Amino acid sequence: MSLQNLKAAIESQKPISFTYNKPGKTPGQRIGNPHAVWVMRKIDGSESTKVHVVQTGGVSDSGQELPSFRMFDLGVLADVEVLSDSKPFEISDQYNPEWEKYTFVIAKV
């Protein structure tokens, strides 16, 4: 369900809310604008699915001021909700749709 909701949010450029439950990170709800979902393949051949989000609100443990362009692991995202009543977000100037790591793209703006 998380992936389906992310793809819908990216296609409509709508913000999302989600819970991030990665060990070592502050748990809790985050809000942001998803720009891309892709499979990242490491040199050793292992893979993980990543999400690029401009985080605009919620819990943050990085100390960076929001909004901030962030990468999250899809496997530990939960309760992904498309904020469909919100206006479409603007594409961040930090977003590079031609980024070399976007080899195996699932969805991107």
Image (tube, rainbow, N blue to C red):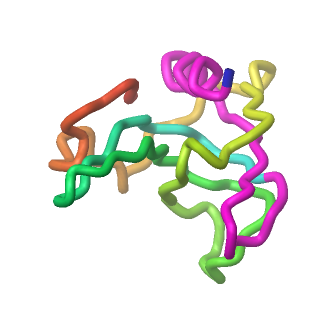
Please check the rendered image and state whether residue 17 is part of the magenta-colored stretch, yes or no: yes
* Left or right, 34 with reference to 35: right
Residue under the image location 67 percent in, 44 percent down? 77
User: Front-most of 31 and 29?
Assistant: 29
User: Front-most of 103 and 60?
Assistant: 103
Expressed as whole percent of the image width and height from the top left, the position of residue 102 reads 24, 41
Q: Quadrant of residue 84?
A: top right
Expressed as whole percent of the image width and height from the top left, the position of residue 64 reads 60, 78
Residue under the image location 36 percent in, 56 percent down? 94
* Left or right, 63 with reference to 35: right
Residue under the image location 35 percent in, 48 percent down? 95
Specify the segment rendered in magenta.
Answer: 2-29
User: Front-most of 91 and 20?
Assistant: 20
Q: Quadrant of residue 27?
A: bottom right
Quadrant (top left/top right/bottom left/bottom right) for the C terminus? top left
Expressed as whole percent of the image width and height from the top left, the position of residue 93 reads 37, 51
